[in-house]
Image: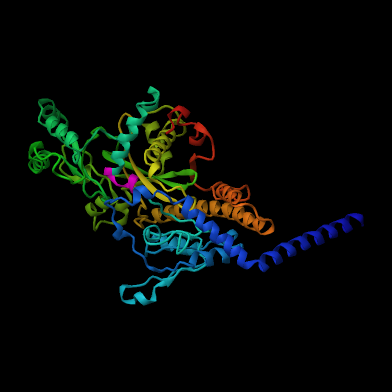
């Protein structure tokens, strides 16, 4: 009986506390709005702040930033206040959307409680209004970054976005290469072992830089180059920088193509005068072959937050083979480049069963099995002991070489796909990095895998958003009960705004993303001990 009385008393006390707190909160509605407005102001001034870089003239394709939403500067205050008073909108539901008609849109609509209707050019007056409940915009276009005011018309306190400024530094081949060489130069000033294994990009010449351009044309005119060309086939490929993907802009430098390049640059006389972002990159002519075909594999990764820097890499990988057998002397582009767009062009009109042959497997375990059967490796844990650490370290270096361009803001994230090539001696090289990679319906297996991929990404975004929501909601509630000085409030906010997972919002065990960077941790622990503390920039 005593226990029952005690239990009832505790329930009454809890109910009284809950009623007091919630009555207090609702009575202080205007104060709640003011605190939220103050928080959004702090995000604008303290975060999303790489202004010096983004105010300079950059050759970015802002035509990809298509705003399809009606925006107003009171939206964030209304949306965040609504979510404060309706916790289930964030803590139990998923409110996400997509601005293009693609597989990703189908996936996010299957897990979301809202849908934003698309508009056509003829119906501009009927632009959609962002719902107050929107929490996870999963858009193809980055209009929220380029055409909105953060903390006012979009990029609100209780939202997690799937884009960030600075992604071009990884996704544009010219910027990726610029950052790689600057990064390597920095590592050379550190202990020697720091730069030992940072060789994931083949030797490259940036032809828009006079010295490197001149050095390239000087080299291809040597006897050494001519002898190698005769014995080994093409020694270089050319690539176009900026927003050029899907195999476009890649040219094998055979005799005809080399002569065209020589003519364009007047055999080096025009170096320094041609501003096109053309890269001449050493061609890796010893690829690992699958049934006589060159293969590539794509590893997906996400930068889950930039405050602090947090990144995950996907365990499942799309392994694809080139459409025609490998021959280093072959003039067929499809013999050298395994991009999906090139494969589809080559096999257009063929049966789906034929199509399946070009998308080999989704797990790198299959690659390990092949290598074991071929006796190229003996270690049955080769994936865990060698390949995954190699892949993860490479992605870590890619991110470290570009991180200074990222806005530090826990609202931001970005989805990437990095294409690797495996050589016959089991080295890996980065071919390119794609931001916002297309998820296609090429074969049923890809639909299943891509559905899992998107849901895993959204789960991570939701977990971090919910964790932050709980911390910020607690800070708002405590601020209503006892006012703190502005300096303390800002300090408490900056800490609560920092992305980290709370124990009640773990990532599920069947999520295929593996954390590879977490700057909540110190020194080498932030990089899973794959990069030594002395080598961290």
Instruction: Find residue 221 and report its horizontal and vertical position in percent.
Output: 9, 30
Q: Is residue 528 left or right of residue 65?
A: right
Nearer to me, 312 or 336 = 312
Q: Is residue 28 left or right of residue 427?
A: right
Residue at far top of view:
192
Task: Determine the residue positioned at 25% across, 34% down.
Answer: 284
Residue 365's image quarter? Answer: top left
Task: Determine the residue positioned at 49% across, 56% down.
Answer: 160
Query: Is 183 contained in the magenta span?
Result: no
Q: Is residue 397 above or below residue 433?
A: above
Nearer to me, 102 or 367 = 102
Task: Determine the residue positioned at 47% across, 55% down.
Answer: 44
Instruction: Find residue 194 and report its horizontal and vertical position in percent.
Output: 39, 27
Specify whether residue 197 is in view.
no
Q: Is residue 122 above or below residue 33?
A: below
- The quadrant of the picture occupied by the N terminus is bottom right
Q: Is residue 109 above or below residue 223?
A: below
Q: Which residues are magenta?
A: 168-174
- The image's colouring method is rainbow
- The quadrant of the picture occupied by the C terminus is top left
Instruction: Find residue 201 and report its horizontal and vertical position in percent.
Output: 30, 35
Q: Is residue 425 above or below residue 481?
A: above
Residue at far right of view:
1
Specify whether residue 249 is in view.
yes
Nearer to me, 31 or 128 = 31
């Amino acid at each position: 009986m005593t226990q029952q009385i005690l239990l009832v008393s505790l329930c009454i006390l809890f109910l009284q506390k809950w009623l007091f707190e919630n009555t207090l909160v609702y009575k202080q509605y205007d104060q709640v709005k003011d605190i939220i407005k103050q928080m959004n102001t702090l995000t604008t001034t303290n975060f999303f702040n790489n202004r010096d870089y983004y105010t300079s003239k950059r050759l970015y394709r802002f035509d990809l930033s298509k705003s399809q939403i009606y925006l107003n500067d009171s939206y964030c205050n209304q949306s965040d206040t609504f979510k404060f008073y309706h916790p289930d909108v964030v803590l139990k539901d998923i409110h996400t959307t997509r601005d293009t008609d693609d597989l990703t849109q189908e996936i996010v609509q299957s897990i979301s409680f809202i849908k934003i209707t698309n508009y056509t050019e003829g119906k501009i007056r009927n632009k959609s209004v962002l719902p107050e409940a929107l929490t996870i915009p999963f858009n193809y276009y980055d209009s929220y970054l380029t055409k909105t005011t953060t903390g006012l018309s979009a990029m609100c306190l209780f939202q997690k976005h799937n884009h960030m400024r600075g992604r071009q530094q990884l996704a544009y081949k010219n910027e990726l290469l610029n950052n790689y060489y600057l990064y390597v130069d920095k590592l050379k000033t550190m202990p020697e072992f720091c730069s030992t294994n940072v060789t994931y990009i083949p030797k490259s010449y940036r032809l828009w830089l006079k010295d490197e351009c001149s050095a390239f044309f000087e080299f291809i005119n040597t006897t050494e180059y001519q002898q190698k060309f005769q014995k080994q086939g093409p020694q270089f490929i050319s690539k176009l920088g900026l927003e050029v993907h899907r195999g476009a802009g890649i040219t094998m430098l055979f005799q005809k193509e080399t002569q065209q390049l020589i003519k364009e640059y007047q055999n080096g006389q025009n170096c320094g005068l041609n501003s096109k972002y053309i890269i001449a990159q050493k061609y890796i002519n010893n690829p690992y072959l699958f049934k006589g075909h060159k293969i590539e594999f794509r590893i997906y990764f996400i930068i889950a937050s930039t405050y602090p820097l947090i990144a995950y890499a996907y365990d499942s990988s799309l392994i694809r083979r080139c459409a025609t057998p490998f021959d280093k002397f072959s003039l067929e582009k499809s013999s050298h480049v395994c991009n999906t767009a090139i494969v589809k062009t080559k096999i257009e009109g063929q049966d789906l069963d034929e199509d399946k042959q070009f998308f080999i497997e989704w797990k790198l375990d299959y690659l390990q099995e092949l290598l074991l059967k071929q006796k190229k490796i003996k270690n049955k844990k080769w994936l865990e002991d060698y390949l995954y650490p190699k892949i993860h370290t490479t992605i870590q270096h890619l991110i470290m070489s570009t991180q200074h361009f990222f806005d530090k803001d826990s609202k931001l994230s970005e989805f990437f796909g990095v294409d690797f090539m495996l050589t016959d001696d089991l080295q890996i090289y980065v071919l390119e990095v794609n931001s916002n990679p297309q998820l296609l319906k090429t074969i049923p297996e890809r639909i299943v895998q891509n559905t899992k991929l998107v849901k895993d990404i959204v789960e991570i975004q939701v977990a971090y958003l919910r964790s932050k929501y709980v911390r910020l909601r607690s800070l708002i509630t405590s601020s209503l009960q006892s006012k703190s000085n502005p300096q303390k409030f800002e300090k408490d906010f900056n800490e609560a705004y920092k992305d980290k997972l709370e124990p009640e919002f773990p990532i599920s065990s069947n999520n295929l993303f593996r954390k590879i960077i977490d700057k909540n941790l110190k020194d080498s622990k932030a990089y899973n001990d794959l990069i030594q503390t002395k080598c961290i920039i």
